Amino acid sequence: MLFSATHFSRISLSDHYVVQCSYHKAFVVYAGCNLVLAAAAAALCAYVAPAAAGSGIPEVKAYLNGVDAYSILAPSTLFVKIFGSIGGVSAGFVLGKEGPMVHTGACIASLLGQGGSRKYHLTWTWLRYFKNDRDRRDLITCGAAAGVAAAFRAPVGGVLFALEEAASWWRSALLWRTFFTTAVVAVVLRTFIDFCRSGNCGLFGQGGLIMFDLSSSVPAYGTPDLIAVIVLGIVGGIFGSLYNFLIDKTLRTYSIFNERGAPFKILLTVAVSLLTSCCSYGLPWLAKCTPCPPDAQDQCPTIGRSGNYKNFQCPPNQYNDLASLFLNTNDDAIRNLFSGGTDNEFCLSTLFIFFIGVYCLGIVTYGIAIPSGLFIPVILAGASYGRLVGTFLGSLSKLDKGLFALLGAASFLGGTMRMTVSVCVILLELTNDLLMLPLVMLVLLVSKTVADCFNKGVYDQMVKMKGFPFMEAHAEPYMRNLVAGDVVSGPLITLSGVERVGNIVHAIRLTGHNGFPVVDEPPFSVAPELCGLVLRTHLLVLLKGKRFTKERVSTGAADVLQRFGAYDFAKAGSGKGVKLEEIDINEEEMEMYVDLHPITNRSPYTVVETMSLAKAAILFRELGLRHLCVVPKTPGRPPIVGILTRHDFMPEHILGFFPHIKHHG
Amino acid sequence: MLFSATHFSRISLSDHYVVQCSYHKAFVVYAGCNLVLAAAAAALCAYVAPAAAGSGIPEVKAYLNGVDAYSILAPSTLFVKIFGSIGGVSAGFVLGKEGPMVHTGACIASLLGQGGSRKYHLTWTWLRYFKNDRDRRDLITCGAAAGVAAAFRAPVGGVLFALEEAASWWRSALLWRTFFTTAVVAVVLRTFIDFCRSGNCGLFGQGGLIMFDLSSSVPAYGTPDLIAVIVLGIVGGIFGSLYNFLIDKTLRTYSIFNERGAPFKILLTVAVSLLTSCCSYGLPWLAKCTPCPPDAQDQCPTIGRSGNYKNFQCPPNQYNDLASLFLNTNDDAIRNLFSGGTDNEFCLSTLFIFFIGVYCLGIVTYGIAIPSGLFIPVILAGASYGRLVGTFLGSLSKLDKGLFALLGAASFLGGTMRMTVSVCVILLELTNDLLMLPLVMLVLLVSKTVADCFNKGVYDQMVKMKGFPFMEAHAEPYMRNLVAGDVVSGPLITLSGVERVGNIVHAIRLTGHNGFPVVDEPPFSVAPELCGLVLRTHLLVLLKGKRFTKERVSTGAADVLQRFGAYDFAKAGSGKGVKLEEIDINEEEMEMYVDLHPITNRSPYTVVETMSLAKAAILFRELGLRHLCVVPKTPGRPPIVGILTRHDFMPEHILGFFPHIKHHG
């Protein structure tokens, strides 16, 4: 969908009238265009929004788990994600636009959930209704679903992606909401496609809602085919987990380089861009020219437009099969690999070179400082691998080579991303062939099972590498032998029901805690008892209101209701709330009192200190908590032992307490 | 898939050589065959397993919510469900086999989860690993998914059905397991279909994995079409909610009749069978004969086999369009309605009569004492409604009439069942046409939204009518004004950490409680404190072991581990555990003591009595609890206030305490 100078330069290259010596000039133009685009995208990313680099799916996944990392969903990230992605795809890198589109969708949703952007003067009052954790989380889930739906033109696949990969909490209302979102995406896409089909958009918007139509090939398969498919799945799973392993190593290596500053990021991107240009221009010279098949459905050779059968350096009526893959847009290369009824189009060596090239380029490309998705490189590598296996097996299996390419892509997707249902539906929606459903399911299950033996899914791996405190859905086995009281880390700072302003300011200034337990003491209760939990953000809003009293008396809720509006305590955008520095409290006010009862959550979830840590972790995770109060088992002690936050459940934290426990992460 | 005498009698009826007077004889044979099959199915159901009547989806849904009603998943229910369903479908009723297949799948899964059936001497030792609540629940979810996958030949639809309608708790491992199950179903189905295609199975197994292939019709639609589709969705939603309303009324009326005993159940079934036979044989006489279209793809008229264009009473080369719908299998009728490129096959009056007939027959049929699914009647009524609207609009919309039928079916499914993603995917898998995806999504969303204004989904309605204590995913608004202590109902029976056997026996005999709090008292603790929760089933197993002591001493876990095996405390099948009557305890033993600590759950989830009831309800629901301990806020009182069970969260229970609260159920 994204066309650029590169695209046109490729087309002009396939013109066979250029004379030998001008090939060098052509390479300079081609590599130069790629380099400029890559450098521009990298510069945007390095200087404006470093958070926009990479896929974005791990960040969205972490956000939906409750991790609100810095500027992940900021408007600047959105801007760089869109334009950086256009630059990166146009620069001819082996990367996709799917991950960035998911991130883009999430950013737009977050912007809506914050009530627009105050910084850029884009605010809408009615959006304040979404200013709470749950609605914002729902919106961002819908945004992620819309991203996949738009990227693959797969509305149902988008819903399932949000369910299977993105969301940590799911409820039936969310299913219905994501489905509505993707339905709207489908209708809008369809309208634009219909509009563009009538020739209003130039080269944009070619193709329909089905990207790679395979529906002509009707598979009929027997036992040997099934065995071939299972073997394909096993090997695909191994290659997929190897891909994850290598990406992890590359990212760690790159991070040493990237940490040195923005110029180094751009330098790395430029180097990878040059490597990519050399590969895609240089490697096709290794392939021999093939005569055009007499029964080709496409034009052969294609000159001056995108498509199959690239002429490259060949004489008329011949094509270079490696150029048809390498010197092409990624979408067209996938379409060529998936195409049915073209069993002899690519020879074995071509597929082998392309597979190795794309596999390695995909690994070295991910991690450079531009928005880059993983779906397209994995599908490209998988499709070439599948077609390679299909061609290698030759007469042993009667299945179409295009179908083999599809199954290979499925096996790689299963092996790297470990998604099953969503990948299956996305592939079906991409290829419009429901008859191959059993085979796709089989290959996905096999490859996922095999790959799960070696390592985690690629997104889980990145979430871990980025250090996000991600709460897993299950409790770790060693947690069963610990109790909640074991991992509470001090010092605990409690506030009184009616507290001196100075104490609140000190508590906020000295700690980074986001929640403080409120304890009622005599004369407000008979004995000290846990009243509830108060949030840092709410304390700041209350302090800013400055309704303090000289005496230590409970003023009740009426006063707060009078002073504050319904949405003053609503959740602000990340990093947008009231800050302590903004509040000017003088010495006299510091000695005054404020009643915390009206803003205290009187029903915090609590566990007894002897509760199994595993059960506390499940409570924390299933209810999506941020704070869990630990209360003492026996009376006669202070009414609260401590507060558990998500950091207290992280293996690193627990293993700090108990170094003898072994953790297999 | 289910063929029978009825089927053959129908085929012979379409033979045009029968003379006029023999039509009466034909009716007697036709109605007689139907009646015998219906009576046999009803007798099986009424005498062997009354739980097998109806769809079974509400029961499965309730089970997965934690409601283990009597003999819902028993082997006898399984048997009757299979053979009763065959009888019912063969008897020509307007009912489906989908609901029963879901129930069948769940029954088989439950049988595996119980380690087989001891009663029928089918046990496997290795299945004991599934003998716990969670694994059994997972297995039954997979069984339900397999049922839908097999009924509609829709593997992905099955997964989504399990997610959207059946399951109350969902986790990513379950997605993967249901997907595996339905993949196996797809491969097995495919193998059987391929085997049967070579002519080994007679009339069985016709058709492929796609039941109603629509892929020929490529829709291109404009704004008027979109408006037509939205109107179709609105009216479909209204008809769908009306269907739910009428089914509810019919079920309530029938239940008065059915409660009077098995003979009355059979009588009702016979009456409905006669009504159905009269309609399907009598109504086609109202339709005029139509000349066969010259360009018909099917044979016209079809004689001696299933298919389109039934000859009925017409002269050669003509067909009766109403007979093609009524006097046909339900599957073929749907196929005829969905068929594309046959815009003039059915005239307006025919569709109108069929729509009214099927709509009413569907309502009166559900509720009789045979296994009966709701999908097929709803799809039939919806498809005829859609085709009726399509034919009525005529030239206003360019969409194919078969597509209108599909959209009509979608609107009815959305209006009655209120499922979105799963119905969408099931319809896509049934019809193999991804290009109409945006339209199907749109119509589903519109009809569900409209119908939600009037009443609940049909399965939710039935769950409520059957009186299952179903825990909703959200807390009711009035719960926010109550606290957990408000709804605790007494008297509370607590056990000591080391308890007299007599007390335990009394507690079990006198109450129906399934969980008892265990309180440690001096000398086992300094002050009385809550030790944990012990389950009735575990107490019974412990009593059966008879390891009692004369003195009140703690024996510790070693003794229990020595006496009992790892799976003695595993969850037994419903109603299969140790019973109090089986344990023979003499007077002397009644005075002895037993240590409950080893079998006590030391980490029960607790809430403080002042916790908001809404938050307690969410804790209860999200963690899938059966017991929730309520502890006192202030020290110096007994360490436990009461136990909340799912019954305590039911509106009926709460409104009994607080009659002034208004509940809009």
Image: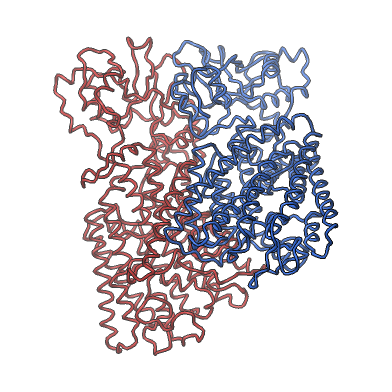
Chain colours: A blue, B red
Q: How many marks?
A: 0
Q: Position of residue A23 (x, y in %)?
A: 82, 56
Q: Nearer the viewer, residue B41 or B146?
A: B146
* Residue sitting nearer the eye, A332 or A518: A332
Q: Is residue B238 visible?
A: no
Quadrant of the image occupied by residue B47: bottom left
Name the spot of residue A167 as percent of width and height, x first. Answer: 57, 41
* Residue at image location 28% in from the left, 52% down from the top: B77
Instruction: Name which quarter of the figure residue B540 lies in.
Output: top left
**Quadrant into which the N terminus of chain A falls:** bottom right
Front residue of B56/A212: it is: A212
Image quadrant assignment for residue B14: bottom left
In this picture, residue B554 sits left or right of residue B150: left
Please tell me which residue lies in front, A55 or B339: A55
Q: Residue at x 34, y 53 (%)?
A: B104
Q: Is residue A633 left or right of residue A246?
A: left
Res. A110 in view: yes
Determine whether A54 is above or below A591 in the image.
below
Q: Is residue B28 above or below residue A658?
A: below
Determine whether B577 is above or below A202 in the image. above
Q: What is the x, y in percent for residue B175? A: 48, 45
* Residue B602 against residue B19 in the figure, above or below: above
Q: Is residue B124 left or right of residue A324?
A: left
Find residue A171 and report its horizontal and vertical position in percent: 52, 43
